[in-house]
Image (cartoon, grey):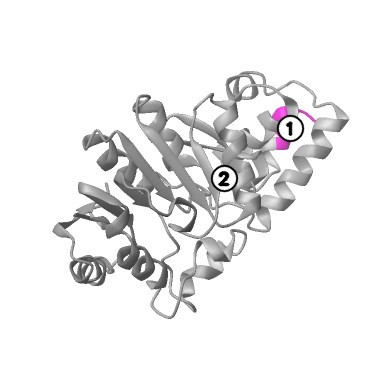
Amino acid sequence: MTVEEALRGSAIDAREARLLLAFATGLSEAAVAAFPEVPLPAAAESAFGSFIERRRAGEPIAYILGRKEFYSLDLAVTPEVLIPRPETELLVELALRLAPSSVLDLGTGSGAIALAIKKHLPAARVTAVEASAAALEVARRNAVRHALEVELFYGNWFSPVAGRTFDVVVSNPPYVAAGDPHLAGLAHEPAEALVCGRDGLDAIREIARTAPPHLAHGGWLLVEHGLGQEDAVKALFHAAGLEEVQAWPDLAGIPRVTGGRR
């Protein structure tokens, strides 16, 4: 079987097919595109067939490849962590605008947010907390891979950093409501990183309620949320005593991050 025959018979998105074939062969995407007549070694053909079967079954391509780019970082991802989304880059951008000297990332998962902030604010002290030991190990591997010094703690929300304050606290917590029909398309990702309560706001309630003592004077809490949740999240921030509460839209114009200042 040649490269061209493998791609033609994949029956998936052409771009994804090229990515998977490059991964199976060890070639670059450019080489896969440039040499369609090259015959595939048996091992590469078998690996590509396996990848195609997994993709047809709905497994995200990031899990098959074991990596995902986020804010110019090539990150390892596994089924134990949520796949970083482009819309989450807004959270990083907002944090960077504030130029904090200390940052806390709650529910860090793969470490995407914390590591992106550290990369662009190397002088900042960046701390990350994660309640899944398996996810925390992925974050640790990513930190080592990119030589970024981030404090990593195992635990739930603010528990591991009791008594400490930060200039900025960021979080992309679970915010999908239980029973949401969109969950059917997210079956391969960890439910605990997606779903949180009947309205999806249980985690954000807890974060907003407990955040103020962990914010330095003038410090900001920035939280990602879903479509249509901005008013409820603003109300939670106001109830926690935060000021200058506002929401920012992502590139699609959807209010994606709400923030408030102590």
Quadrant where the N terminus sits is: top right
Q: Spot the residue most to the front.
A: 163
Kindly report which numbered mark, 2 or 1, lies closer to the viewer in this rendering.
Answer: 1
| Rendered residue at 75%/20% (across/down) | 38
Residue 226 visible in the shown view: no
Residue 129 x, y percent position in the rendering:
49, 50
Q: Spot the residue most to the left.
A: 244
User: Relative to 32, is 104 on the left or the right?
Assistant: left
| Rendered residue at 54%/47% (across/down) | 153
**Residue span colored magenta:** 1-6
The residue tagged with tag 2: helix, strand or loop?
loop
| Rendered residue at 16%/57% (across/down) | 246
Q: Is residue 193 magenta?
A: no
- Reply above or below: 106 against 178: above
The CA span between labels 2 and 1 is 16 Å
Quadrant of residue 104 in the image? top left
Q: Which mark is residue 24?
A: 1
Residue under label 2: 13
Residue 211 x, y percent position in the rendering:
32, 59
- Amino acid of disc 2: Asp
> 217 or 3: nearer the eye?
217
- Reply above or below: 223 against 63: below
> 133 or 84: nearer the eye?
133
Residue 164 x, y percent position in the rendering:
37, 48
- Reply above or below: 161 against 94: below
